Image (tube, rainbow, N blue to C red):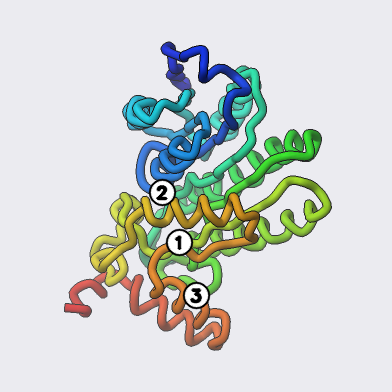
């Protein structure tokens, strides 16, 4: 069962219509929490979503910015979780001006050895829930002829990803999907932006069983910096942004111009189990 938390101390100056509303999935930590924070600091009210109990603490933290915050705990890897979120949106009494579809998970390791259950869960969260939420939210935005959607993709979308094969493929899907829908909506006032971070200092590598990899043990970007890059690109109406360090931009550019076999070998050096010790 999903749990809800509501801001019970809303001042008259922060009633519905006083500011725009941003919804963020995967907002209990990492990039999602920092996205919510940057929206709040720029005058948005928030509807935040995550599967874990940390969403309640995140909501309390974000209310300190002065934003109105509604939160729901829901597992977007399930159809029921997506329905719970969209039904809750309908009860807010105001439209979603910005939707940041950020929730995602990775699975590292050899494809033939990885848990099929974990990889199917990844597909349900990274791909299926993204499509369903986008379908529901974008229909509403197009009807109003107003709105912005941010999809969290990855620089892994632009290269084969050995030892993250299903994760990389899921991000390639999101990148292609975002760019295609953006083109479909080019004659509307609804914009689509794809966020492509590189290795970021979040819980991702622990959950993906990748702490013994070169990328998992290496230097990572600050999620707050990634979120600021994402916000700037979203509000500027850009189609995508490679966020974070110059290294991310260089890797992404290289991946687009070298043969895919070469890009795959480069990724393998970063993601192969045990490669953290090889780098020492």
* Mark closest to the chain's N terminus, 2 or 1: 2
Quadrant assignment, res 90: top right
For label 1, the SS is loop
Residue 197 is marked as 1
For the residues marked 2 and 1, what is the alpha-carbon distance in whole angstroms?
A: 9 Å
Number of callouts in the render?
A: 3
* Mark closest to the chain's N terminus, 3 or 2: 2
Q: Position of residue 204 (x, y in %)?
A: 35, 53
Q: Residue at x 48, y 82 (%)?
A: 263
Q: Position of residue 196 (x, y in %)?
A: 51, 62
Residue 239 relative to residue 70: left or right: right
Q: Residues within 10 Å of mark 3 (few under 14, many from 20)?
A: many
Q: Residue at x 30, y 61 (%)?
A: 210
For label 3, the SS is helix
For the residues marked 3 and 2, what is the alpha-carbon distance in whole angstroms?
A: 19 Å
Q: Residue at x 73, y 39 (%)?
A: 146
The C terminus sits in image quarter: bottom left
Residue receiving disc 2: 31
Residue 252 is marked as 3
Does the residue at mark 2 contact the one at mark 1 (Cβ under 8 Å)?
yes
């Amino acid at each position: 069962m999903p749990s809800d938390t509501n801001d019970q101390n809303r001042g008259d100056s922060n009633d519905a219509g006083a500011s725009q509303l941003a919804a963020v999935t995967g907002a209990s930590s990492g990039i999602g929490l920092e996205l919510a924070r940057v929206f709040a600091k720029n005058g948005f009210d928030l509807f935040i979503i995550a599967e874990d109990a940390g969403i309640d603490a995140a909501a309390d933290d974000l209310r300190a910015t002065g934003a109105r915050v509604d939160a729901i705990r829901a597992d977007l890897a399930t159809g029921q979780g997506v329905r719970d979120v969209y039904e809750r949106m309908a009860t807010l009494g105001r439209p979603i001006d910005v939707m940041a579809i950020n929730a995602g998970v990775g699975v590292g390791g050899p494809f033939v050895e990885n848990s099929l259950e974990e990889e199917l869960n990844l597909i349900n969260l990274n791909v299926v829930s993204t499509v369903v939420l986008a379908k529901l939210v974008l229909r509403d935005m197009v009807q109003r002829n107003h709105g912005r959607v941010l999809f969290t993709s990855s620089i892994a979308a632009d290269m084969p990803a050995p030892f993250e094969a299903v994760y990389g493929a899921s991000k390639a899907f999101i990148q292609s999907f975002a760019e295609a829908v953006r083109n479909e909506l080019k004659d509307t006032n609804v914009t689509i932006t794809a966020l492509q971070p590189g290795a970021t200092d979040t819980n991702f590598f622990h959950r993906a069983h990748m702490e013994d990899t070169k990328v998992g043990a290496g230097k990572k970007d600050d999620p707050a910096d990634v979120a600021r890059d994402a916000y700037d690109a979203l509000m500027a109406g850009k189609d995508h942004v490679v966020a974070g360090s110059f290294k991310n931009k260089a890797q992404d550019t290289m991946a687009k111009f070298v043969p895919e076999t070469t890009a795959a070998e480069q990724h393998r050096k970063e993601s192969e189990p045990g490669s953290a010790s090889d780098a020492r």
